[in-house]
């Protein structure tokens, strides 16, 4: 090694090498210092100051405004760092001209030592003059800057608060849209140019982003927006604190959620806060302690009622839901949509269609209900597949809620050219392209189209921690994350395999551990004792092996009680057990659009409903059931599942309506299902119900269809779609 060093020592004598090393060394150290300063600014969102320091931006502007962040970066790197490096280069040419490259050529052009000295001091004088003027202007802010603290916890209260009195109308508008689950309205509000105090406008747009991300299940982004809102409000605001706590719950960080909830003053706590405290304890079945008084006090709360009904249905993988169990309208509707997703998974298309029709009739303006009806029409289980009616529903949604990402996802399913930049649409495209094994996936345009936060497939489960389809699409190994997000995603297959929802070891595992392995360790120890003619040592060795086996089992059980979002041991073991029983975790086998409807535990905060998923360890809160009794209980549903037609699991081809004519049965189908008034309100292009026995030449009725052309083109009917075909199918099923 020393010979190698001696061989290259001559490089130290080169002027270029020495000057480059000196310049880069100082520049890199300076840039690293500036980068660390900027990182702390962005993390803390705070104003740095010395005695008479300069305020570049207020904390809430640094957190909320990208233009301010860009200005801060430009000042730090282009102004301060560039100015410093330029002075460094000039000093190097002044003091070490013999070592610097091109020194002779520059001196021949007049760049002599006096000129360099004059330029250096000129730059220094100008820089010091600018700094002196800025310093003098910032002197009145000295007292304010000295009173500020470094802000690494924006949820803590402090002095700076924006006067939001002028923005009450914006706040009311946002909450009204959120209570209606109007994601389209929230997204449009974020892009509006509004007059007035821009600090208040920025704050309300941050509130809209926070609620919108939370309603979509993008909890890490909702967490970031809630911190930003708290920073702008000076740490005040119960709603932002509760959203931050729910974000921690959704990402399975229960300790952080408890810290926030129990840190709220008692006089500020409302019913939503107390219910969240109770839910946080309930989500930890091993260490949580639910307050009995709180449980009795909020027994009629919609969230508590919904939780009780959800756990009862979970015990037998039941999907049925009347949708009118609680007093919260949107929560009932969301629960009904989740039941529709479960019914589609369990191939109970008739019940799913009935629930979807009821949901649209009860709330025609709700986007989720109309999407559920469109998906049921595409399944073709309760009635022949009706693509044109589903297309009418999509075009009505595209008119009424063009900014809603769920509408974009339905557009991808229906075969329309739709944006893939949002997670909902990208998941539809990705799940349809998953391979049959579910362990590999082509890199498609959906993986490239989503934004920076979800461009990598492996980050989808982190962007949407309560979305099981995102976990399954992220990689072939995301099965345990899917179970930690929402256990209901495998409910249909577990019911078919006769697997009750439980984390307890099966009889086979007990047999292997206690009747095979432990006697084997005892036999090995005794055999070793006979082999060495020391039976005492053999017995001791056998006991030691048995105790070690028991200790390992206890350690594993203890690790299973450690709640995390990823690689949670109980969910890893549950996923292995499901795979041994031939449960398929391939997302391409799921009904298309499942992630648009399926939800877990629903929580209401200030009238707005949020989904926090249903982690698999929640089965510890339900009574255990013997597998034999469970199989007898679900025997009828298992028979129906195995003989029924599965729901559609693939998206439609692009522009299919240009190659088909509308069937006569499809004309006025929505009017017959929903009533003429509702059908005409949500789908203006939908054809009116035709008289009995009328032909199918007219009445495409929409822009994309060609049913109204009347050019004599023969209508191709799907085999078995008529009444005779249905009778033949019933006879074949009976045989």
Image: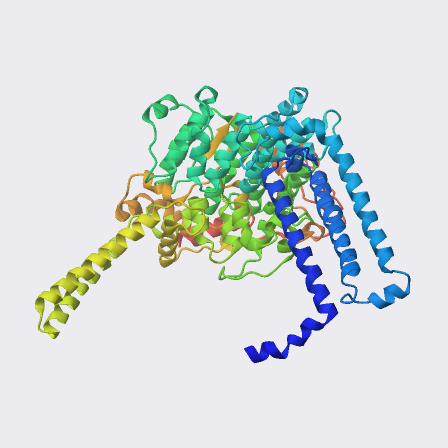
Among the 4 quarters of the image, the one containing residue 398? top right
Image height of 8 relative to 165, above or below: below
* Left or right: residue 238 compared with residue 517: right
Q: Along the line of sight, which residue is nearer the eye, 60 or 535?
A: 60
Q: Quadrant of residue 616?
A: top left
Please identify the residue farthest to the right as the structure is shown: 109
Which residue: 41% across, 29% down? 304
Image coords of residue 528 (percent x, y): 14, 71
Judged left or right of residue 90, residue 363 is left
427 left or right of 136 in image: left
The image's colour scheme reads rainbow
Depth order, front residue of 692/510: 510
Question: Which quadrant of the rendered structure holds the C terminus?
Answer: bottom left
Give x and y (percent) for residue 664: 65, 43
In the rendering, at what x and y percent does residue 190 appear? 68, 34
Q: Quadrant of the N terminus?
A: bottom right
């Amino acid at each position: 090694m020393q010979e190698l060093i001696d061989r290259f020592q001559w490089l130290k004598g080169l002027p270029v090498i020495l000057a480059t090393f000196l310049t880069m060394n100082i520049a890199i150290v300076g840039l690293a210092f500036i980068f660390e300063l900027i990182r702390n600014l962005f993390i803390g969102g705070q104003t740095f100051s010395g005695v008479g320091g300069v305020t570049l931006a207020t904390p809430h502007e640094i957190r909320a405004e990208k233009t301010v962040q860009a200005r801060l970066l430009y000042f730090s790197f282009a102004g301060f760092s560039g100015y410093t490096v330029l002075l460094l280069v000039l000093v190097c040419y002044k003091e070490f001209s013999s070592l610097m490259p091109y020194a002779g050529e520059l001196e021949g052009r007049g760049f002599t030592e006096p000129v360099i000295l004059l330029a250096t001091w000129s730059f220094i004088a100008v820089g010091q003059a600018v700094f002196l003027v800025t310093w003098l202007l910032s002197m009145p802010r000295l007292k304010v800057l000295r009173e500020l603290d470094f802000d690494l916890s924006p949820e803590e209260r402090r002095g700076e608060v924006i006067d939001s009195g002028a923005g009450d109308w914006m706040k009311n508008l946002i909450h009204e849209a959120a209570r209606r689950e109007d994601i389209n309205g929230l997204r449009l509000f974020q892009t509006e140019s509004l007059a007035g105090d821009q600090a208040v406008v920025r704050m309300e747009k941050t509130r809209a982003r926070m609620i919108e991300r939370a309603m979509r299940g993008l909890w890490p982004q909702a967490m970031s927006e809630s911190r930003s809102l708290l920073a702008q409000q000076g740490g005040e605001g119960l709603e932002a604190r509760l959203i931050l706590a729910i974000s921690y719950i959704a990402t399975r960080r229960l300790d952080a959620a408890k810290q926030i909830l129990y840190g709220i003053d008692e006089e500020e706590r409302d019913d939503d806060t107390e219910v969240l405290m109770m839910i946080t304890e309930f989500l930890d079945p091993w260490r949580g302690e639910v307050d009995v008084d709180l449980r009795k006090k909020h027994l009629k709360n919609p969230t508590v009622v919904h939780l009780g009904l959800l756990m009862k249905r979970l015990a037998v993988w039941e999907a049925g839901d009347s949708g009118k169990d609680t007093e919260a309208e949107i929560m009932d509707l969301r629960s009904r949509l989740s039941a529709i997703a479960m019914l589609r998974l369990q191939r109970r298309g008739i019940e799913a269609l009935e629930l979807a029709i009821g949901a649209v009739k009860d709330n025609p303006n709700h986007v989720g209900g109309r999407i559920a009806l469109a998906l049921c029409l595409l399944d073709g289980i309760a009635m022949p597949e009706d693509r044109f009616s589903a297309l009418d529903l999509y075009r009505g949604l595209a008119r009424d809620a063009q900014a809603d990402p769920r509408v974009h996802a339905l557009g991808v399913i229906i075969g329309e050219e739709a944006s893939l930049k949002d997670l909902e649409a990208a998941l539809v495209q990705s799940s349809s392209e998953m391979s049959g094994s579910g362990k590999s996936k082509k890199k498609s345009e959906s993986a490239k189209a989503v934004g920076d936060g979800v461009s990598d497939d492996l980050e989808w489960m982190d962007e949407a921690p309560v979305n099981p389809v995102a976990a399954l699409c992220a990689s072939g190994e995301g099965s345990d994350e899917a179970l930690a997000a929402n256990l209901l995603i495998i409910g249909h297959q577990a019911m078919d395999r006769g697997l009750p929802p439980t984390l307890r070891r099966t009889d086979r595992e007990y047999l292997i551990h206690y009747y095979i392995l432990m006697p084997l360790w005892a036999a090995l120890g005794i055999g070793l004792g006979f082999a060495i003619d020391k039976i005492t040592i053999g017995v001791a060795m056998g006991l030691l092996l048995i105790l070690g086996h028991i200790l390992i089992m206890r350690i594993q059980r203890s690790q299973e009680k450690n709640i995390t979002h990823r690689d949670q041991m109980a969910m890893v073991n549950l996923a292995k057990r499901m795979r041994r029983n031939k449960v398929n975790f391939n997302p391409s086998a799921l009904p298309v659009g499942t992630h648009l409807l399926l939800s877990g535990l629903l929580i209401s905060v200030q009238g707005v409903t949020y989904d926090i998923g249903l982690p698999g360890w929640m089965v510890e809160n339900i009574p255990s059931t013997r597998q034999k009794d469970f199989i007898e209980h679900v025997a009828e549903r298992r028979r129906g599942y195995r003989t029924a037609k599965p729901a559609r699991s693939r998206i439609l081809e692009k522009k299919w309506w240009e190659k088909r004519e509308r069937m006569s049965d499809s004309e006025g189908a929505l009017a017959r299902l929903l009533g003429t008034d509702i059908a005409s309100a949500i789908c203006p292009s939908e054809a009116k119900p035709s008289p009995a026995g009328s032909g199918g030449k007219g009445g495409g009725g929409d822009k994309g269809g060609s049913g109204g052309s009347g050019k004599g083109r023969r209508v191709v009917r799907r085999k078995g779609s008529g009444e005779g075909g249905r009778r033949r199918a019933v006879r074949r099923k009976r045989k």
